[in-house]
Image: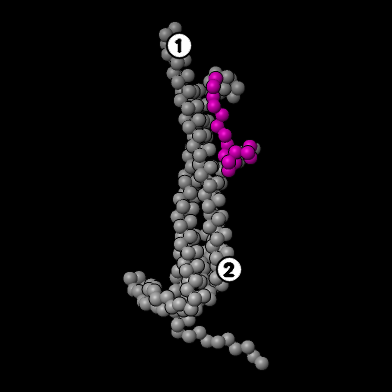
Amino acid sequence: VKNVRRKETTREKISRLLLLLLAAAAASHSSAPGTVLRPRAMNNDDAATPGGIPQAEFIEDVAAHLSKGSMTHDEAITQLQDLYSKYKFIDVRLVTSKNNLKGKIPEIRKTLEAVQFLRAKASSDEVVTTHFELASNVLATANVSKAEHVCLWLGANVMMEFTFDEAETLLSKNLKTAGENLAVVEGQLAFLRDQITTSEVNIARVYNDEVRQRQAAKAS
């Protein structure tokens, strides 16, 4: 006996299309669900710092710092400015990651709520009347009843069909992961801003020390 798959009715096709459109809101067009853009920090032996970001050492004694590195004021300032520019580069990437996460979390939450709403309506055999987009500025009306699946974007123009249980599990996991990653990025940003401030103070201290020495040399 051959297994023959029942042909979908027009109503079922419309239902699947609606679910597809609602679920697509959770997708990120550039990454898979749960994938977060992580900044690549500079190489550093101190793995205890957030994200491996190098910790800026406060220069309390400028003369001792220059003597230790056998550097002039100009060389020290150049070195500090190079570190400062690297911090600013990491800052841009972290801010981008933070904004991506802050934009993605509401989309995942909204899609999860849509899946839960459709599941509740399907279990009660209630027909949902809604509108979906056929093309730009072109909408159509559909009656959705007894839906059993949703389709989610996985990124790279890949879409998969899930049951309600699978979709809720995936979206809940992605929502939790995105929230945790946002907290991590915010912690890295807070640490990084401290290092940027320390670098700015160090540059100013070395520069002011050079100015004082020049003034003392002229006075003598």
In the depicted view, which residue is nearer to us: 172 or 67?
172
Q: On screen, 207 above or below 99?
A: above
The residue lying furthest to the left in this view is 137
Magenta span includes 39: no
**Residue 194 in the image, given as x and y percentages of width and height:** 50, 34
Asked whether residue 90 is in view, the answer is no
Label 1 residue SS: helix
Q: Residues within 10 Å of mark 1 (few under 14, many from 20)?
A: few
In the image, farthest residue toward the top: 220
Q: Which residues are magenta?
A: 46-61
Q: Nearer the viewer, residue 66 or 170?
A: 170
Q: Could you tell me which residue is drawn at 44 percent across and 70 percent down? A: 21
Residue occupying the far right of the picture: 1
Quick one: quadrant of the C terminus? Answer: top left
Q: Position of residue 56 (x, y in %)?
A: 55, 32
Compute the Cα span from label 1 to label 2. Answer: 76 Å
Classify residue 3 by image quadrant: bottom right
Is residue 60 inside the magenta stretch?
Answer: yes
Farthest-out residue, bottom: 1
Tell me the residue that label 2 is attached to. 166
State the residue in front, 8 or 121.
121
Give the answer, above or below, for where 28 lies relative to 14: above
Looking at the image, is mark 1 or mark 2 nearer the viewer? 2
**Where residue 125 sits in the image (x, y, percent)?**
48, 78
| Residue 217: mark in rendering | 1
Amino acid type at circle 1 is Ala
* Quadrant in the rendering for residue 218: top left
What secondary structure prevails in the magenta region?
loop
Direction from residue 177 to residue 103 in the image, left or right: left
The amino acid sitting under disc 2 is Glu
